[in-house]
Image (cartoon, coloured by chain):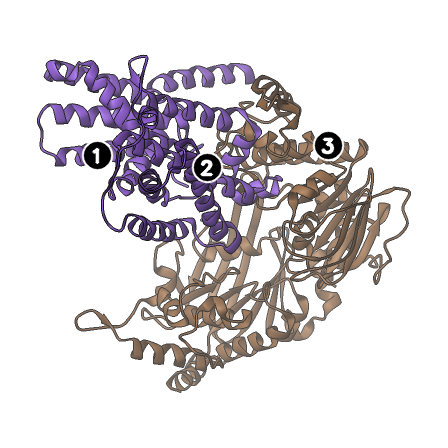
C-alpha cells in the first residue's frame, strides 16, 4: 500500500522526464561492428520497447547497460548525471535493475530466499534472521505486483509466470535505492502464451509507479500491445524511435528488416511440397514443450533450413528428431524408426546431431581432441576387442587436416581450442560416420568468419555426397547460403516454407516475425 | 608452419610428461632412499618388502576396483562395507558350514555383484545421487555385518588350502599381491585399450554429451558399480584367508585409503585421469611412507597425517599447475 502511494508521488514529480540518455554509443567486436553511434533514451513511467533481429545490436546495448561490455565510445547518463555501468554496484545504487532471460532464480530455494538473494536479509540481534518478518515482506512485495502465492513454496514448483514475477519483484526490491529503470530482456521467451497477459499487467503496474521499463522482445504483437515508444535497431544502428500508436505490425516488420518493400513470399503455410529428392528423414506429428504436431521430411542430398524466433520451436526441432529430448510423434530415417530418447539407436539408424550447446552437450572436456572426434563410433578401430590407436590417430589427423582445425594437435584437451575449432571437431565427429541425415543446431554460433565458411562448405559437400542435412539456425544469411529449402517455425508449427530462389534473408526474417 | 608448431608443442609435452606423469615414482624412490639411510637395519629387509606387498594387496584391490565407478563419474562409498561383510560372511561359512571354500568365494563375489546391482538400481533407475545411495548401502551392510557375526569376533580354523589362498608366497612375494597385479592389468587394459573403456571415461567426463554421441551411459554406470562391489567382495575373501579370522572392524576403514590412492593416482601415469596404474603406484607410495615412519618409531598419528598431507599436496599441486589446462577434472 505504501508503495502505491510512493508510486503516485513519483509520477507526479517526474512525469515523463528523461531517465536514461544514451548518446552515440558504439561497440565493435574485432571487425564486427555491433553498435554504431546509437542514441537511446527512456523516460520515467514509460515502457520503451527495444526491437530488432538477432545481431541487430539490442543485446549488446543491454549488456553495455549491465556493465558486461565496455562501450568503445559515447556517453550514458542516468537522471542527468553521468553513469558508468562498469563500476561495480553502480547500476543497483542508481536504481537500474535487470531481469535477464534466464531469470537467475534458484529452484531449490523458496520464494523468500530467492528474493533475499538480491538484497540480503534483515537481521535482528544476534544476527538472527526473522523469518516471520522476511515472509511478510516477500508477500507484500509480490502482492504489490498482483501475485498471491505461498512464499514458502519452492521456486522450482511454481508456474512460469510466477517465476518471472519473482524475478521482477527481486529486481525492484533493494535496500540501496528504489528502482528507477527496469530492463526486461525477452521476458516472454519461456512463457506460455496464456500467461503473458499476467506479465503485461505486472509491467503496467510498474510503469504506474513511475519506473521506466526497457522491454526487449522479438514478439511484435507484445510490443504493440504494451509499449509506449519503440526503438528499432538494425545492423547495429538505430533505425528510429517511434510512438507505438504510430506503428502497426507491417510497418514494424518493414523497419526491422529494411531493404525496401517487397511483398512477402509464401503467405500462409505451404504443404511440405514434393521434391525430386528421395526422403531420407520423415518426421510426423512431432510434439514437445513448444512443438505442436510438426511434420517434415528431408531428402537425400538436400539441405533444409529451419528458421524461427526463440520460443517458436526452432530450437526444439533438432533435439526432438534425434531423441535427445522427450517428444511424441514418429521419426524414421530411410524407413527405419527412431524411438524417442535413444540417441544410440538414432545413430544406428543413420542420424547425426550437432547440438547448439557444444560445451555442455557436444564435447567431453576431460578428453582430448582425438577421443572427442571418434566418440560416436569406435568400431573401425576395434580388432579382437582392442582399440588400434595408430589407425585412430592417422584417421583423426586426416579429418583435422580436411577441416583445417588449428592447431592440428589431436592430443590437446578439447576445451583448449577456439569456438570455431571446437565446432569443427564436432562436425568431424559426425561427418566421419557418414550419417544418412545430419541435423545441425546453430552450427556456426560463436564461430569466427573463416571457420564459418569452412563449416558451410562442409555442410553443402555432405549433402552433395548424398546425406540429408537439416540446419536449424537464427542466422538467416547462413540459411540463404546453404539451404535448398527453408521451413519457418511460428508458435510451435511450421508456418511457412521457402523454396530455392525464393529464399532470401528478408523473406525469412519477415516470415519469422509474422 | 602448422607442422613446426606441432613439433614444438610435442617437444614441450614430452618434457612435461617426464616430470609430471611419473613424479610419484620419483617421490617413491625418494621415500625409499630416505628411510634406507635413516633406518637401514629394519627398512631394507625382505620382511618389510613382503609385509608391504601383502598388507597393501587388499587395500590395493579395493582401490583399483574403485577406479571404475570414479572413471564413470559416480561414487561408490559402499566398498568398505562390502569388504567387511564378505570378510565376516566367509569366516562364518567356514565355521558353520561344510561348503567348499572355492564355492564360498564364488558366493561372496555373487553377493558383491548383487550389492552393485542394488546400488545401480538406486543410482540409475531411481536417480538417487550415487554418494547418497552407496552411503545408504554402507549402513545397510553394516547391519548385516553385525547380524551375521552377532557382534562378536568370529574365529575358526580354515583349511590349509584356503589359508594358502591368502598367504602363499610366490617368487618371494605373497600371493594376494599377484591378484592385485592381475586386477590392475585387466582394469588398465579395459579402460585404456577397449571401446568400453573409452565410453566409460566419456560417461564420467560429460554424461550428457556422451549420451548424445550414442553411449549407453546408464549401462556403464551400472557395470562400474557392479565391478567395484564385486572386487571389494573378492578382497574381503582374500582378507579372511590372510587373517584367518573375522574382525568386525577390518573392512570399513579401507574406504578412505582407497579413495586417497585413486585421487593421488589420478595425478600419475595418465595425468588428470583416474587410472589403474597410477592408483597402484599411489597405494604403494603411501604404504612405503607409512611403513618407514613406523619403523623409524614415530607416533601412531603420523601415519594418517602422512596420508592426508600427501594427498592434499599431490592433488593440490596437480590442479594448480593445470589450471585452465584441460583435460582435467580429478573428481567425478
Discs 1, 3 touching: Cβ within 8 Å: no
Query: At numbered mark 1, what does the secondary structure look like: helix, strand or loop?
Result: helix
Residue plotted at (28% across, 38% down): B254
- Whether A68 is drawn above or below B296: the answer is below
Q: Left or right? Give the position of A116 relative to A63.
A: left
Viewed as shown, does residue A220 lie left or right of B60?
A: right
Mark 2, residue position = B227
**In the drawing, what numbered circle is on residue A434?**
3
Q: Is residue A116 visible?
A: yes
Disc marking residue B309: 1
> In the image, residue B85 lies at what x, y percent?
34, 44
Tell me the subunit letter for badge 3. Answer: A
> Which of the pair A139/A327 is nearer the observer?
A327
Q: Is residue B315 above or below residue B27?
A: below
Crowding near the residue tagged with mark 1, few <14, some 14–19, many ≥20 C-alpha atoms within 10 Å: few
Chain coloured brown:
A
Which of the two labelled residues, at mark 1 and mark 2, occupies the earlier sequence position?
2
Q: Which chain appears purple?
A: B
Residue A179 visible here:
no
Label 1 – label 3 distance at C-alpha: 51 Å
The one nearer the camera, A433 or B238, is: B238
Mark 2 secondary-structure assignment: helix
Amino acid at each position: 500500500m505504501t508503495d502505491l502511494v510512493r508510486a503516485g508521488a513519483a509520477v507526479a514529480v517526474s512525469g515523463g522526464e528523461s531517465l536514461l540518455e544514451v548518446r552515440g554509443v558504439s561497440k565493435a567486436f574485432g571487425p564486427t561492428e555491433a553498435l554504431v553511434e546509437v542514441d537511446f533514451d527512456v523516460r520515467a513511467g514509460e515502457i520503451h520497447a527495444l526491437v530488432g533481429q538477432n545481431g541487430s545490436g539490442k543485446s549488446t546495448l543491454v549488456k553495455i547497460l549491465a556493465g558486461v561490455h565496455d562501450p568503445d565510445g559515447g556517453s550514458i547518463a542516468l537522471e542527468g548525471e553521468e553513469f558508468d555501468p562498469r563500476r561495480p554496484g553502480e547500476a543497483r545504487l542508481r536504481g537500474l535493475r535487470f531481469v535477464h532471460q534466464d531469470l537467475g532464480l534458484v529452484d531449490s530455494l523458496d520464494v523468500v530466499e530467492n528474493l533475499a538473494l538480491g538484497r540480503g536479509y534483515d537481521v535482528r540481534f544476534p544476527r538472527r534472521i526473522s523469518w516471520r518478518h522476511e515472509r511478510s515482506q516477500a508477500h507484500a512485495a509480490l502482492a504489490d505486483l498482483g501475485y498471491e502465492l505461498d512464499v514458502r513454496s519452492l521456486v522450482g514448483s511454481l508456474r512460469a509466470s510466477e517465476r518471472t514475477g519473482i524475478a521482477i519483484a527481486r529486481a525492484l526490491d533493494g535496500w540501496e535505492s528504489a528502482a528507477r529503470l527496469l530492463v526486461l530482456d525477452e521476458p516472454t521467451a519461456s512463457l506460455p502464451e496464456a500467461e503473458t497477459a499476467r506479465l503485461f499487467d505486472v509491467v503496467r503496474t510498474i510503469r504506474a509507479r513511475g519506473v521506466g521499463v526497457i522491454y526487449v522482445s522479438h514478439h511484435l504483437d507484445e510490443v504493440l500491445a504494451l509499449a509506449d515508444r519503440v526503438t528499432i535497431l538494425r545492423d547495429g544502428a538505430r533505425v528510429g524511435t517511434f510512438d507505438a500508436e504510430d506503428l502497426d505490425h507491417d510497418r514494424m516488420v518493414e523497419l526491422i528488416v529494411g531493404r525496401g518493400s517487397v511483398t512477402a513470399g509464401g503467405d500462409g503455410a505451404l504443404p511440405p511440397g514434393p521434391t525430386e529428392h528421395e526422403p531420407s528423414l520423415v518426421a510426423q506429428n512431432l510434439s514437445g514443450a513448444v512443438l505442436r504436431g510438426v511434420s517434415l521430411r528431408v531428402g537425400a542430398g538436400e539441405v533444409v533450413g529451419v528458421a524461427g524466433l526463440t520460443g517458436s520451436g526452432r530450437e526444439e526441432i533438432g533435439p526432438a528428431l534425434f531423441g535427445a529430448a522427450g517428444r511424441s510423434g514418429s521419426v524414421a530415417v530411410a524407413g527405419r524408426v527412431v524411438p524417442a530418447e535413444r540417441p544410440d539407436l538414432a545413430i544406428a539408424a543413420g542420424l547425426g546431431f550437432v547440438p547448439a550447446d557444444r560445451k555442455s552437450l557436444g564435447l567431453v572436456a576431460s578428453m582430448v581432441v582425438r577421443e572427442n572426434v571418434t566418440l560416436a563410433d569406435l568400431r573401425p578401430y576395434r580388432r579382437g576387442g582392442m582399440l588400434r590407436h595408430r589407425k585412430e590417430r592417422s584417421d583423426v589427423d586426416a579429418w583435422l587436416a580436411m577441416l583445417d582445425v588449428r592447431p592440428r594437435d589431436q592430443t590437446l584437451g578439447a576445451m583448449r581450442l577456439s569456438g570455431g575449432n571446437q565446432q569443427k571437431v564436432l562436425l568431424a565427429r559426425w561427418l566421419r560416420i557418414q550419417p544418412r541425415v545430419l541435423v545441425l543446431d546453430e552450427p556456426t554460433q560463436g564461430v569466427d568468419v573463416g571457420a564459418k565458411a569452412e563449416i558451410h562448405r562442409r555442410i553443402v559437400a555432405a549433402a552433395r555426397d548424398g546425406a540429408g542435412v537439416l540446419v536449424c539456425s537464427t542466422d538467416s544469411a547462413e540459411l540463404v547460403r546453404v539451404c535448398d529449402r527453408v521451413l519457418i517455425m511460428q508458435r510451435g508449427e511450421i508456418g511457412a516454407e521457402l523454396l530455392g530462389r525464393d529464399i532470401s534473408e528478408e523473406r525469412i526474417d519477415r516470415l519469422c516475425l509474422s | 608452419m602448422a607442422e613446426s608448431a606441432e613439433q614444438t608443442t610435442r617437444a614441450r609435452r614430452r618434457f612435461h610428461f617426464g616430470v609430471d606423469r611419473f613424479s610419484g615414482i620419483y617421490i617413491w624412490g625418494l621415500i625409499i632412499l630416505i628411510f634406507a639411510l635413516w633406518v637401514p637395519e629394519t627398512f631394507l629387509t625382505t620382511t618389510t618388502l613382503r609385509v608391504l606387498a601383502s598388507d597393501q594387496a587388499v587395500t590395493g584391490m579395493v582401490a583399483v576396483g574403485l577406479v571404475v565407478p570414479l572413471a564413470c563419474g559416480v561414487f561408490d562409498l559402499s566398498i568398505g562395507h562390502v569388504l567387511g561383510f564378505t570378510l565376516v560372511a566367509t569366516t562364518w561359512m567356514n565355521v558353520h558350514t561344510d561348503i567348499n571354500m572355492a564355492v564360498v568365494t564364488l558366493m561372496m563375489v555373487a553377493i558383491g555383484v548383487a550389492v552393485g546391482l542394488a546400488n545401480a538400481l538406486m543410482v540409475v533407475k531411481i536417480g538417487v545421487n550415487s554418494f547418497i545411495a552407496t552411503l545408504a548401502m554402507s549402513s545397510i551392510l553394516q547391519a548385516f555385518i553385525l547380524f551375521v557375526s552377532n557382534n562378536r569376533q568370529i574365529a575358526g580354523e580354515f583349511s590349509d588350502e584356503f589359508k594358502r589362498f591368502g598367504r602363499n608366497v610366490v617368487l618371494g612375494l605373497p600371493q594376494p599381491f599377484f591378484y592385485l597385479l592381475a586386477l590392475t592389468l585387466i582394469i588398465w587394459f579395459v579402460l585404456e585399450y577397449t571401446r568400453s573403456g573409452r565410453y566409460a571415461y566419456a560417461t564420467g567426463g560429460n554424461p550428457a554429451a556422451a549420451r548424445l554421441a550414442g553411449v549407453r551411459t546408464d549401462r556403464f554406470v551400472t557395470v562400474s558399480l557392479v565391478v567395484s562391489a564385486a572386487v571389494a567382495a573378492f578382497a574381503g575373501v582374500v582378507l579372511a584367508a590372510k587373517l584367518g579370522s573375522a574382525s568386525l572392524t577390518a573392512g570399513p576403514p579401507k574406504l578412505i585409503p582407497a579413495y586417497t590412492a585413486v585421487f593421488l593416482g589420478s595425478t600419475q601415469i595418465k595425468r588428470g585421469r583416474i587410472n589403474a596404474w597410477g592408483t597402484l603406484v599411489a597405494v604403494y607410495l603411501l604404504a612405503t611412507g607409512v611403513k618407514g615412519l613406523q619403523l623409524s618409531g614415530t607416533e601412531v598419528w603420523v601415519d594418517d597425517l602422512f596420508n592426508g598431507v600427501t594427498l592434499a599436496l599431490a592433488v593440490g599441486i596437480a590442479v594448480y599447475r593445470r589450471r585452465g589446462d584441460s583435460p582435467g577434472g580429478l573428481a567425478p
